[in-house]
Amino acid sequence: MDHQQIKELISSYYDGELDEEQKKIIKKHLEDCPECQKEFEEMGKFEEVMSKMELKKPPKEAWKIYWTSVYNRLERRIGWILFSIGVMILLFFGGYKMVEEIIKDPSISFLLKAGILAVLGGVVVLLVSLIREQLFVRKRERYKEVEK
């Protein structure tokens, strides 16, 4: 291994990612290279400081704010999902009523009826999706105030 490869493996040494042979190679190199020896010692000090650090527990108020925020986002998403499902059901029902005579006609094949219902369902889903997308984009438009 060359000098640069050894330097790159010093942090891996402290992380316990090296096998015994790699550790021996690094130790041997450290005996002859003051630059790597210095970096090895600095990494050791860094590891020591990091091992003594403890995470500070956030105050109860921070947790309260966090969970309120999570709840609000979840609540809005569920609301939008339910709203979208409701609109799709109503639009699909309205579309079905428009083509009800065709669907009930026994002379028209089942495949054609299924195709009509699939197209109707697809139009409803795409329409709701398009409306939601436009509301989303309009709400986040950064250049509303800029004249075109």
Image (cartoon, rainbow, N blue to C red):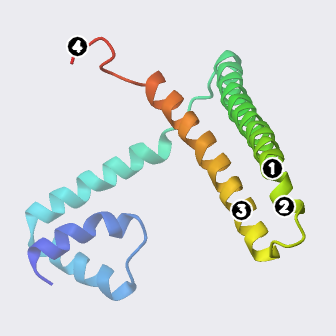
Q: Which residue is mark 3?
A: 116
The amino acid type, in three-letter code, at marker 4 is Glu
Q: Between residue 46 and residue 89, name the one nearer to us.
A: 89
The answer to whether marks 1 and 2 mark residues whose Cβ atoms lie closer than 8 Å is yes
Judged from the image, the secondary structure of the residue bearing numbered disc 4 is loop
Q: Earlier in the sequence, mark 4 or mark 3?
A: 3
Name which residue lies at 59% across and 48% down.
126
Q: Using the numbered discs, state the Cα–Cα distance from disc 2 to disc 4 in whole angstroms.
A: 50 Å
Q: Earlier in the sequence, mark 1 or mark 2?
A: 1
The answer to whether marks 2 and 4 mark residues whose Cβ atoms lie closer than 8 Å is no
Question: Which label sits in the foreground, 4 or 3?
Answer: 3
Q: Which residue is mark 2?
A: 103
Q: Earlier in the sequence, mark 1 or mark 3?
A: 1
Instruction: Give the quadrant of the C terminus.
Output: top left
Q: Using the numbered discs, state the Cα–Cα distance from disc 1 to disc 2 in whole angstroms.
A: 8 Å
The amino acid type, in three-letter code, at marker 1 is Tyr
Q: Using the numbered discs, state the Cα–Cα distance from disc 3 to disc 2 in whole angstroms.
A: 8 Å
Q: Using the numbered discs, state the Cα–Cα distance from disc 4 to disc 1 in whole angstroms.
A: 43 Å
Whether residue 37 sits left or right of residue 92 in the image: it is left
The answer to whether marks 3 and 2 mark residues whose Cβ atoms lie closer than 8 Å is yes
Judged from the image, the secondary structure of the residue bearing numbered disc 2 is helix
Where does residue 67 sit, x and y in percent of width and height? Answer: 71, 27
